[in-house]
Amino acid sequence: MDLKKTFDQALWVFHLNTGSCNGCDIEIVAALTPRYDVERFGIKLVGSPRHADVLLMTGPVTRAMAPRVKRVYNQTPDPKVVLVIGNCGTTTGVFYESYNILGPIDHFLKQIDPDVKIVYVPGCPPRPEAIIDAVAKAWLVLEELRGDNK
Amino acid sequence: MADTTYTFPIGPVHPALKEPTMFKFVMDGEVVVDVDVQPGINHRGIEFIGMRRNVLQTLHLAERICGICSIVHQYAFTLATERAAQVFEVPERAQYIRIIMAELERLHSHLLWAGVAAHELGFDTLLHLSWKIREDVQDVLEIISGNRVNYAMYYPGGVRRDIPPEKIPRIKKVLDHYKENFQMLADTFLGDPVIKHRTVGVGTLSKKDAIATSTVGPTTRASGVMKDVRFDQPYDAYADIDIKPVIPSNYGFEDAGDVYANIVVRLIEVAQSIEIIEYALDNMPSGPYRAEMNVNKVLMMLRKADGEGFGIHEAPRGEMCHYVRLKENQDNLDAWKVRASTYNNILAWQKKLIGQQIADVSIVAASIDPCIGCMDRVAVVDSRTGKEKIMTDVDFHRLSVEKTKRLRK
């Protein structure tokens, strides 16, 4: 991994649960709290997608959440990266044959933005270390995007 | 509604709880006049999926109903399956390992809740402190099972993994660490004047209402109701241990049913769990940890079984039930019904929230330790019709009765 200009700016993340079982969500909070403590790098959970650089999405997309996934994605300012955390978000996992699960997260994001940048973090649930690693990867993508915008 | 009231929607995406659920509050100034809860956003149709898979596959699905209370679903499901099949004799060692895991789960769940409660109060230092302490029990769970969440420990006829003697000193070290830190945590939560101001008399649930809404677990014990499955109808190794339901008045506090009483109950249960784990570790008999080691044989036994079973477990959030029906010569489950503890406890929201200030809503809502992932399997409400519908206990009861009728057919 080659981080060139990294840490020039605090990274703010917004967390969206699209129908997850909570397993990934508590690991996200575990990554923020003292043992793993990503807040020391300026990575902070914010209350609104309008303030976020990175979207953390967990869980398979349920029928009720499908329109909200698109709405939250559209509300996030560019440049943005999506982190899909857990097996359910990447492939719908164990819930694949449910009548109320419409599909994995990228299925919906690609409908509204074919160029969406996604970092996948498989695992059930992924360990906090994996989540931190993925955030660092998202940072590289963001740097690239900023470079394009200049 | 009077002219002075207005509707204040929260959710389904909101920063307070980590899970999607939707509230509609009817407000008069700062005071909540009416509450409308619209669940069903997190509905994943798990019972439907489970009835298309065999028991050992569903065992893993049951675990993924909820990530925070994963083990309790697996526990209740295993108990229900064993009672339906009636062919497994669970070895004593397995029974002890089962309760050790269940109590470790309670430790981590209550500490997690303590952190969330502190966060809802705006006391983030305490959130970080509770979660820092919680990481130690996560280590123990990882040492035993290999995973921090979703431990996959239970199995029809025993447990999947043994706890070898060389791991026991490491577990005991963490328990000692907890005993040292427990007083500090208790002093902070129970003695801090700011926490007292925010929680005493806030979101009260009277004993009468607690019984009427059939709340379970710490929510009902905080109101002074003696209700604990481990005490009322002991199962597995809980029968060997003297467990008394924790109600605040036994420890010199008031059975007020407010947020403060909820904190008291959960903190004392942390101490109680530590005692249970220590007892179980010391008195665990040697022997096999599973009745049948061959997976194919287990599947054949389950395939030949015919009957129905009911598994009840005292989860960190309260009593939770799984109903399983097996049919002969059929791989998949014939019927599966899950009744999670939040399903009962959510009814208390209406009693607790009405008359509160809007600023207290999040801590009152959190006081029952809601677990939407557990609950959202049955009730489906269309939130887009915009129809004002109050989900009362009557509505929930009607849905529940209809579902039971369907299952009986």
Image (cartoon, coloured by chain):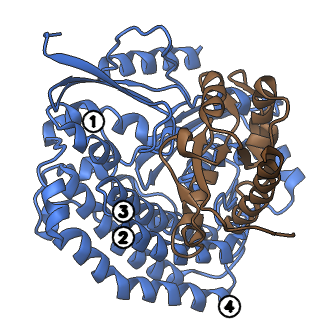
CA separation, marks 4 and 2?
36 Å
Observer able to see residue B7:
yes
Image: A105 above or below A33: above
Image: B44 above or below B359: above
Along the line of sight, which residue is nearer the eye, A6 or B375?
A6
Q: Nearer the viewer, mark 2 or mark 1?
A: 2
Image: B313 above or below B95: above
Three-letter amino acid code of the residue under disc 2: Thr
Disc on the earlier residue, 2 or 3? 3
Q: Nearer the viewer, mark 1 or mark 4?
A: 1
On residue B348, which mark appears?
1
CA separation, marks 3 and 4?
31 Å
Disc on the earlier residue, 2 or 1? 2
Q: Nearer the viewer, mark 3 or mark 4?
A: 3
Q: Quadrant of residue A37?
A: bottom right
In the rendered structure, the residue with mark 4 lies on which chain? B
The kind of secondary structure element at disc 4 is helix
Which chain is tinted blue?
A: B
| Residue found 50% across the figure and 50% down from its top | A46
Three-letter amino acid code of the residue under disc 1: Ala
CA separation, marks 1 and 3?
19 Å
Which chain is tinted brown?
A: A
Q: Position of residue B173 (x, y in %)?
A: 52, 90
| Residue found 54% across the figure and 39% down from its top | A50
Along the line of sight, which residue is nearer the eye, B28 or B356?
B28
The kind of secondary structure element at disc 1 is helix
Few, some or many C-alpha atoms within 10 Å of disc 1 (few <14, some 14-19, many ≥20)? Answer: many
Q: Which residue is mark 3?
A: B114
